[in-house]
Amino acid sequence: MAKKPKFYVVWKGRETGVFSSWEDCKAQTNGFDGAVFKSFESKALAEQAFHDSSSHYIGKNKKVVSTLSKEALALIGEPIEDAIAVDGAWNTNTGVVEYQGVYLKTYEVLFHVGPLDDGTNNIVEFLAIVHALALSKQWHWKIPIYSDSRIALGWVNEKKARTNHPPSEKNKKLFELIARAEKWLENNTYENELLKWETKAWGENPADFGRK
């Protein structure tokens, strides 16, 4: 099935307006200090948003009521906005998985992969981190990458997806992605910090699929 086209609003960038491709949007925002942009599912919505305030569309998920003490919150601090957050989703009934990465400053979805058959949450959390690292290297981004999965962060540090999930014909594509990710980690270095997303302090990971 063909992927639905998206439209991109740039409120602040080298040029502002509505753009019909991510490449055009990136040309206006990549490396531009304080760039403000977001994707929309239709041109009509994008044009409406462009003539409105960006604050009506960006950052609404950031407010959270935390149960942690003021002292604990002070120790954790605030998340870095110039960063990528990644997350995975796993359907417990079907075993279907997917993952995505979001730019924290604008909540722009940078990538989305899936659905893929017969996986686990840890696998797609791992793949999401490596995808963000590879994309950052391609774009020369050295910004932090947040994940809420300690297990996946550990796998990336070890350069190995230590899953016990058995490969099969059904999940062949998924295991091909795992092998590719492990090979990338073996053959590449990166300067991005890999950080834990502190859900108790900051609320749900912005890359969360919202299906809990």
Image: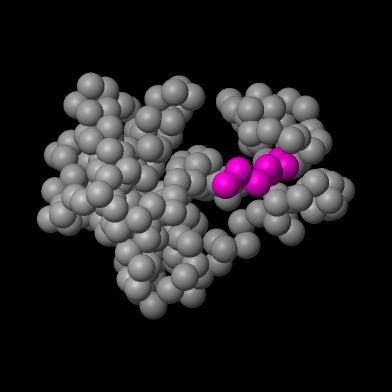
Q: Nearer the viewer, residue 158 or 114?
A: 114
Establish if 180 lies above or below 167. above
Relative to 28, is 81 on the left or the right?
A: left
Direction from residue 121 to residue 11 in the image, left or right: right
In the rendered image, residue 13, in percent from the top left (x then y), is placed at 71, 31
Picture coordinates of residue 110, whole percent (x, y):
53, 41
Residue 5 magenta-highlighted = yes
Residue drawn at (68%, 44%), measured in percent from left and top?
6
Count of picture labels: 0
Q: Residue furthest front?
A: 169
- Asked whether residue 95 appears in the rendered view, the answer is yes
Instruction: Write down the region rendered in magenta.
Output: 1-8
Residue 72 percent coordinates (x, y): 32, 67
- Please identify the dominant SS of the magenta region: loop
Q: Residue at x 40, y 38 (%)?
A: 132
Q: Residue at x 23, y 36 (%)?
A: 179
Q: Is residue 148 left or right of residue 163?
A: right
Query: Looking at the picture, does residue 56 appear above or below residue 175?
Result: below
Percent x, y of residue 197: 36, 55
Q: Is residue 43 magenta?
A: no
Looking at the image, which is closer to me, 175 or 184? 175
Q: Toward which corner of the image does residue 87 lie, by quadrant?
A: bottom left
Please tell me which residue lies in front, 55 or 90.
90
Q: Identify which residue is drawn at 32% across, 64% down.
A: 95
